[in-house]
Amino acid sequence: MSEKDLAARILEYVGGEQNVQALTHCVTRLRFNLKNDRLAQDQKIEALDDVMGVQKKGGQYQVIIGPKVTQVYKAIVSKVPRLNENSDLAPNTKKESLINRVINALSAILVPSLAPVIGGGMLKGFLYLLTTMKWVDSKSGTMFVLNISADAMFYFFPFLLAISSARFFKTNEYMAATLAGALLYPTLISAATAGKVAQVKFLGFIPIPMFNYSQSVIPIILAVWFLSYVYRFLEDHLPSMVTVIFTPLISLIVVVPITLFCLAPLGFYIGDYIAKALQVLINFSPLLAGAIIGGLRPVLVLTGMHHALRPLTIQQVATYGYSTLQAMNFMSTMAQASAALAIYLIVRNKKMKQISLSATISGFLGITEPALYGVLVKYKAAFAGACLGGALGGGIGAAMGAKAMAMVMPSVLSVPVFLNDKSAGFLIGVGVSIVSTIIITFLLSKTVFKLEEVPSSEKSQTDLTAIDVKSPVNGDVYLTEDVQDETFSKELMGKTVAIMPSDGVILAPVTGKVQMVFKTRHSIGLISDEGVEVMLHIGIDTVNLEGKYFESFVKEGDQVRVGQKLLEFDLAKIKESGYDPTVIVVITNSSNYLSVLSPADSEPIKAEESLIKIVENGENVR
């Protein structure tokens, strides 16, 4: 089940979006604040694939997901954007830079409206192919209807953005749609298309600029943002008996003129100049620009910064009728899928072969998350191969003018959108991305980033080895079943050990790599050089402290050795705040091993003493 489908099912079974007051998440679970807990269907939720259990605690309805929790959370928020304001990111909103807030807002507004845009873009690509190859008559009635289907969402894009903007800014959706109608008013569009100078003056002296806003992005967003303040002010200050009549009336009188002579032209110029500035950079060195975008996209996706490119891509299409960024993104998508394919061809472990093959197929279809999170982050050779292959393909493709004629999901199914007068550059770039990624991944896996995989045929089930996981803290080990959290007491995430700490210093229990440092710093994920995945979780429900009393000394991607200090926490302050400071150690991939042995009884332990013994055999991927 995909994260999107899982999110939809969970949302349905907790009583629907109308029953959700707020939603946050921590490293293991979704945390709902429900209006009525009795509407939640526990058994149906627990029966879902990838759901490990349900827990009601601290006024929250918690659904335990595990490593996929972030993706499922994002899927729910994309479906119900209003929940984003109540998310675990909310406490840090004021600390974000203006640029980050703008990017986040644009992403939240654009994502819900992309479905018809992507569909229309795909259709435009197929129609272009059909007419170019002269397989159909471009003047036929069938093509007339199909062109309407392909172009409608682009001509009336402000209407789509008006709805998602209204939801984001929490204002009246129908008033927002009316603003879109004002921007696309036939007289205004006709004058702009004919190139006429503004003849209309509001109040006799304020000229109304004539622009074609049909494919614009920023003007309608600015208009709805302004509407949200005006509409809210009127609702709060007008007498309740007249607010239904006068709030929309005054809003129209105030917002529409200001939008037409100020906000919309400002947004038009901003979008136009951004696209032109971007094009100047690309024209300066297409090879360099393509290499940077194509090579860094996997990194941007991991950090969430790829959302910043989406509005730029749409604006390129609005300004020029095509997007070069879209072509660069395509090269990177093909490179990521090809890196997963290379791992499929290299590894011998059956389970990893299945994972990499599945990730390859979904990657070529445009969904790179399985490849990125399931393969590339586990194999440095694959990650480096995808970055370098994407850079080569993106650079060569951009240098040869590769471009997309519409906004689409980068996928083998969307190839027709990229077939135009620069098709040769696109096809060569794609070929370079795929071939170079496979070759680079293969070479790196045998040299710099050697996989060190032990073929299953060379070891029997009796050739056992043991991996030692050390204690990360001084304290007392106690029975896992006594932990006051069912996720850990029932070992839903994997083999679990609980330690009541005697101090606030956490050391690395294995030598390996930091996979994850949760933003509240109360949890760290590691993967050892042998492939053991270890999650350290400090305290029960300490995610609510929002990072207070925690200090991290490592970041995601760092290499660490056993005994290296990972973080410190104020043990006394956490206790004073009413939280259980238990340090939880979880082997999240326990099922990959023959046996995971932990202390059976309560006993004191010192940091760096042996805590867990893991028994493996030749079937394990190193």
Image (tube, rainbow, N blue to C red):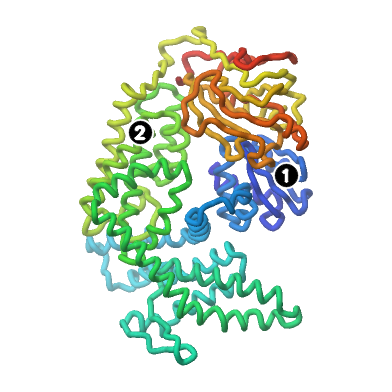
Residue 609 location, quadrant: top right
Q: Quadrant of residue 124?
A: bottom left
* 249 vs 20, nearest the viewer: 249
Q: Residue at x 72, y 41 (%)?
A: 43
Locate the C terminus by quadrant: top left
Disc 2, SS: helix
Query: Does 55 appear above or below 442?
Result: below
Q: Residue at x 24, y 58 (%)?
A: 420
Depth check: give the residue in front, 369 or 574: 574
Pair 1/2: label in front = 2
Pointer 1: what residue?
61
- Give residue 500's position: percent from left, percent from top: 72, 23
Q: Which residue is mark 2?
A: 384
Q: Tell me: 548 left or right of 366.
A: right
Do the residues under discs 1 and 2 have CB atoms within 8 angstroms? no
Give the amino acid at mark 1.
Tyr
